[in-house]
Image (cartoon, helix red, strand yellow):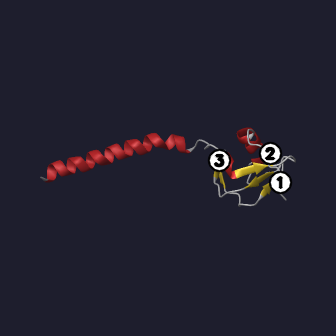
Amino acid sequence: MRAPRNRLCRLSLAVASLVLISIEPSLGEDLAVPCTAFARNGDGDWKVLAPVMLHIDGRLLGPMVGTTVAPGTVTNGIRISEVLERECRSLPLQQTGMR
């Protein structure tokens, strides 16, 4: 009885290893920016509305809720306002004052 169980364990480990190896390259890719976590105003500023973790250029960035990001701001080597403009340009402008 032990021989089939050992084979099953080895087979399971081999399959799990193959799955993990095939997933690994995708971990280095940038993830989609959750645009609903941000709002922009007419001045080009972006405000963080919800908790969010961004994976951009191989770096993680977790801006605090309520933070306002002005155009040209560089945080942790990432020009977050440029990324938001590129990824979330279809968001409507926020009508109320953000500051």
Q: Residue type at mark 3?
A: Pro
Per the image, label 2 sits on a secondary structure element best described as loop
How many numbered marks have been drawn onto this rendered protein structure? 3
Tell me what residue is drawn at x 38 percent, y 41 percent: 18
Q: Residue type at mark 2?
A: Leu
Crowd rating for badge 3 (residues with CA inside 10 Å; few <14, some 14–19, many 20+): some
Tell me what residue is drawn at x 71 percent, y 60 percent: 65
Image coordinates for residue 83, horizontal then vertical, percent:
73, 43
Question: In the rendered image, which quarter is residue 86 located in?
Answer: top right
Q: Residue type at mark 1?
A: Thr
Residue bearing the label numbered 2: 93
Crowd rating for badge 2 (residues with CA inside 10 Å; few <14, some 14–19, many 20+): some
Residue bearing the label numbered 3: 34
Per the image, label 3 sits on a secondary structure element best described as loop
Of all residues, the one furthest to the right in this rendering is: 43
Per the image, label 1 sits on a secondary structure element best described as loop
The vertical placement of 61 against 82, above or below, is: below
| Quarter the C terminus occupies | bottom right
Among numbered discs 1 and 3, the one appearing first in the sequence: 3
Q: CA distance from mark 1 to mark 3?
A: 21 Å
Image coordinates for residue 58, horizontal then vertical, percent:
63, 47
Residue bearing the label numbered 1: 96
Of all residues, the one furthest to the front in this rendering is: 95
Q: Nearer the viewer, mark 3 or mark 2?
A: 2
Tell me what residue is drawn at x 67 percent, y 48 percent: 36
Crowd rating for badge 1 (residues with CA inside 10 Å; few <14, some 14–19, many 20+): few
Question: In the rendered image, which quarter is residue 90 located in?
Answer: top right
